[in-house]
Image: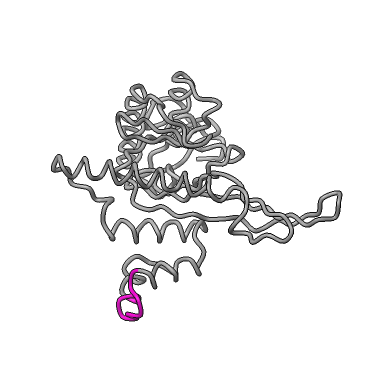
């Protein structure tokens, strides 16, 4: 078959034309069906993920399972009601204990259903981490130095499709003569982190009281999400070492075992 040959999409049954993916089992999927499965956040809004769904290593069975998950996601979004925007990128439904990463200023039910962003249960939040961009220094017109850094919240979910996200939650600003960690913006960033952490813990406690199994509330999920976040470049190698030291102390054997088991570099 040539580059411009027309195969039949195994999902919708239409001709694939120019945009198509050949799967591992020889089936083809068209660009339209592929895009319906994959949701890409707009980076300029401050929400980042590097999830790559449909690819040539997948089988049609795997594609169909993802397709069903995305359809179920759309059904759940129909009942989502944002009662608390923590910031412009993090929407919370306190009634259902669910979270959606979506631009609040674009938020309407119709827009949400059109974009179909992933919806998560707070009890499935397995990993949280605060990260900061490199400090940008500049001078004011009066010659005084200033410094600025963006603050990000790294979130890792127990989810079969979308798991690790990097979300911009604020900026830290400093003026000449002040310590960076005691300047404008720090308290707001910490408030967002603490608020999500508290809601996550409350959701887990409620689920636990109902006898629900909670995979996210385990060290296995924590190390898995840390490994994924590190692989994506959201958590630095020095921060990974800090986590290992925090949970393993000076037990070098345990550290080696964890790094090997979860492929932590």
Main SS of the magenta segment?
helix
Residue 97 in the magenta stretch? The answer is: no
Residue 250 in the magenta stretch? The answer is: yes
Q: Can residue 261 be seen in this view?
A: yes
Q: Which residue is drawn at 13% across and 43% down?
A: 211
Q: Residue furthest left?
A: 211
Percent of width and height locating residue 169:
54, 44
Query: What span is in magenta?
Result: 247-256
- What is the quadrant of the C terminus in the image? bottom left
Q: Which of 178 and 44 is in front in this view?
A: 178
Left or right: where 202 falls relative to 129: left
Q: Residue at x 51, y 45 (%)?
A: 167
Q: Which residue is drawn at 39% across and 73% down?
A: 245
Q: Which of 229 and 40 is in front in this view?
A: 229
Q: Nearer the viewer, residue 192 or 104?
A: 192
Q: Please tell me whether residue 104 is drawn above or below residue 163 in the rendered image.
A: above
Q: Can residue 24 be seen in this view?
A: no
Percent of width and height locating residue 63:
35, 39
Q: Please tell me whether residue 147 is drawn above or below residue 122 in the rendered image.
A: below
Percent of width and height locating residue 8:
42, 30
């Amino acid at each position: 078959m040539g580059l411009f040959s027309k195969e039949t999409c195994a999902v919708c049954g239409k001709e694939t034309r120019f945009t198509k993916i050949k799967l591992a089992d020889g089936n083809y999927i068209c660009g339209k069906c592929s895009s319906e499965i994959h949701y890409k956040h707009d980076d300029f809004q401050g929400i980042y993920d590097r999830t790559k769904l449909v690819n040539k290593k997948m089988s049609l069975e795997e594609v169909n399972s993802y397709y069903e998950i995305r359809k179920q996601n759309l059904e759940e979004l129909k009942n989502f009601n944002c009662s608390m925007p923590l910031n412009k990128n993090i929407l919370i439904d306190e009634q259902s204990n669910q979270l959606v990463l979506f631009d609040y200023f674009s938020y309407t039910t119709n827009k949400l259903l059109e974009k179909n962003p992933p919806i998560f249960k707070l009890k499935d939040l397995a990993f949280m981490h605060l990260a900061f961009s490199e400090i940008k220094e500049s001078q004011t017109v009066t010659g005084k130095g200033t410094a600025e850094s963006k603050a990000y919240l790294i979130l890792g979910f127990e989810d079969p499709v979308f798991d690790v996200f990097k979300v911009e939650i604020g900026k830290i600003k400093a003026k000449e003569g002040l310590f960076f960690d005691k300047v404008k913006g720090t308290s707001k960033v910490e408030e967002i982190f603490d608020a999500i952490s508290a809601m996550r813990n409350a959701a887990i406690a409620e689920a636990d009281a109902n006898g629900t199994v909670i995979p996210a509330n385990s060290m296995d999920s924590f190390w898995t999400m840390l490994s994924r976040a590190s692989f994506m470049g959201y958590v630095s190698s020095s921060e990974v070492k800090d986590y290992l030291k925090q949970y393993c102390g000076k037990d070098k054997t345990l550290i080696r075992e964890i790094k090997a088991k979860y492929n932590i570099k």
